Image: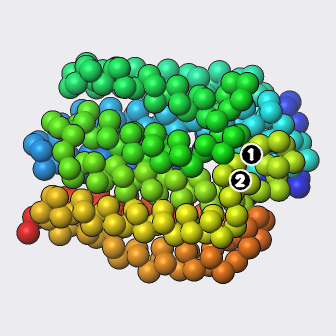
Amino acid sequence: MDADVPPKPPAARESARIWVQAAGPPLVLVLVLQGAFAVTAVRHQGAVEWWRVALTVLLFVCDGIGRRLVNDFEDHRRGVDRPDRVRPDSSMALGLDMNRVRWAGMGGFAAAWVCLLVLALTSEPLLLLVIPPMYAAYFAYAGGRRPLGHRGFGELLDFVVTGTAVTLVVGRLNGDAFDAALWCAALACGFLFMTLMLHNNARDLAKDREAGKVTLPHLIPPAAVKALYVTGLAGCYGFLALTALGLGAWGPLLPLVTLPWAALLAVRVCRGPLGTGMIDWSGLYLLMLAVFATFTAGGWLPAW
């Protein structure tokens, strides 16, 4: 994930193309598909309103931009990213002014909060009590004097908040209730995001240790990391199957076509080393895209 090449100088022209690259289109794409995943999980509850879906997409685009840019700023501020060792597509490597990156990220979050406010006020206002703690958890992960993400809590936060809670809330904002199918879909999502975070942290062991960042793979043995990786993938597919059962439809089982892919990733991780010799995280990222996309497509097929 890192490159031993210096970033572009800050004086480099901050073109729109560079800002789009820094905003993290891959992250935005996976979050938008997570939104589609959540909407599909509540489609059976009633007619889906197009304007809610459009606002949900805008919400995830803005939220994804905010997450990427604020995370880049925090990694720069804490020394995780340095001029001699930085991810090629990070804001620092692209030569952007990091103070502007910080405020652009906060602007993305502000736009996402407006979308959430409109959706909550027109569906379930009580969700406004739940949403602020979710964002507080994210900022506690990346910021503050002792970020939770630097103390081994990254995987837990991704499971509870980024995957499960976000899917539950977005599903409720577009549906009528927190039913069993939505809960199962949300837990499947939680396992998948947890596994992606675990993969990223397991591969960045040396870099994080040098920067003083403590992640879960620093705290547990390599065998336990690999067992948790397999558990995360198995949990995702298990809860996807329960979702289809709860919906009484075969379409949501469509992600099972990706199961051999997931098994191959698990085998390669279990047989290989952790650290920089580990397989790249992009394979798991693409698997996540495929799971979200196939679930969404299958969810609109006729019921049994």
Q: Residue at x 52, y 25 (%)?
A: 136
For residue 45, side relative to residue 204 (left or right): left
SS under mark 2: helix
Q: Amino acid type of disc 2? A: Leu
For residue 164, side relative to residue 278 (left or right): left
Q: Residue at x 13, y 50 (%)?
A: 44
Q: Position of residue 52 (x, y in %)?
A: 25, 33
Q: Position of residue 219 (x, y in %)?
A: 71, 53
208 above or below 248?
A: above
41 above or below 276?
A: above
Q: Quadrant of the N terminus?
A: bottom right
Q: CA distance from mark 2 to mark 1?
A: 8 Å
Q: How is the image coloured?
A: rainbow
Q: Residue at x 59, y 23 (%)?
A: 106
Q: Are marks 2 and 1 in contact (CB under 8 Å)?
A: yes
For residue 204, side relative to residue 179 (left or right): right
SS under mark 1: loop
Given residues 258 and 25, the one toward you in this image is 258
The label number, if any, that marks residue 214 in the structure image? 1
Q: Residues within 10 Å of mark 1 (few under 14, many from 20)?
A: many
Given residues 139 and 88, the one toward you in this image is 139
Q: Amino acid type of disc 1? A: Val
72 above or below 252?
A: above
For residue 279, side relative to residue 265 (left or right): right
- Residue to which mark 2 is pinned: 219
Q: Residue at x 74, y 73 (%)?
A: 273
Given residues 189 and 302, the one toward you in this image is 189
Q: Quadrant of the C terminus?
A: bottom left
